[in-house]
Image (cartoon, rainbow, N blue to C red):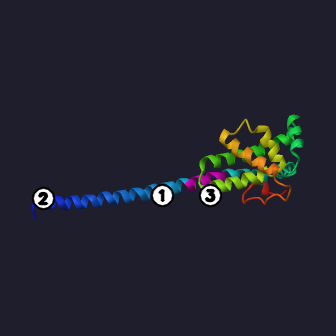
Amino acid sequence: MTLSDLGALGEFFGAFAVFATLLFLAMQVRFARRASEDTSVIMRSQSMREILLALARDPELNALYVRWLPRAEDEVLAALGRSDMEVSRFANICLSVLVTLQSSWLTDRSPMGLALTRSRLRWQLERPGCRAVWTAFRDVHFYSDFRDEIDALVDEIRRAPPGPPSPPPAGLPGSVQG
């Protein structure tokens, strides 16, 4: 075997090694993407869990949330204007949920993540109390792209014929009954 034969053999094995390295790199990138998506889901779940636990641990807070959620938008906005302490606590719960869902919307742009976030947003915003809180605070805590999407959803809900509200998605604070 001549030196040029050994060189050709080395090039062949070198090309195979490059191919194997690229294949390994592609698998690692795929694994990292999946891990990132899983982390996003876990973070969203933990935030929603904290809100649920707060409602579950405090029967008074849960009762307040359940009491104000179906109230008319005008009534909630008027109470917010009077700085009513009870409705302020209710608004803080709604804002916590909406900010958590905004974080989900920003961090998980996968089709499944967006569908889950939108279904939870729809459920919250179908309730007039939460819609009133959105109206009052939409310019304060939220990114413009998120505001545009939610404003479109609120308009769609307001235009829809009255009917029974959709059932709460699993793990949503509104599913806690007092």
Left or right: where 33 falls relative to 79: left
**Residue 148: percent from the left, percent from the top?**
70, 42
8 or 54: nearer the viewer: 8
Residue 4, labelled with which disc? 2
Number of residues whose C-alpha sits closer than 10 Å to that of mark 1, classed few (under 14), some (14–19) or many (20 or more): few
Q: Work out which residue is located at the far left of the displayed protein and give it.
A: 2
Q: Secondary structure at mark 1?
A: helix
Magenta span contains residue 65: no
Residue drawn 67% across the image and 50% down it: 47
Q: Which residues are magenta?
A: 37-46
Magenta span contains residue 38: yes
**Residue 31: percent from the left, percent from the top?**
48, 58
Residue 127 makes an appearance in the image: yes
Number of residues whose C-alpha sits closer than 10 Å to that of mark 2, classed few (under 14), some (14–19) or many (20 or more): few
Spatial CA distance of label 3 from label 2 is 55 Å
Left or right: where 93 falls relative to 82: left
Residue 112, labelled with which disc? 3
Please give the residue where the numbered disc 1 appears in the rendered image: 31
The amino acid sitting under disc 3 is Met
Q: Secondary structure at mark 3?
A: helix
Residue drawn 83% across the image and 53% down it: 59
26 or 170: nearer the viewer: 26
Please, is residue 84 above or below residue 177 in the view?
Answer: above
Q: Earlier in the sequence, mark 3 or mark 2?
A: 2
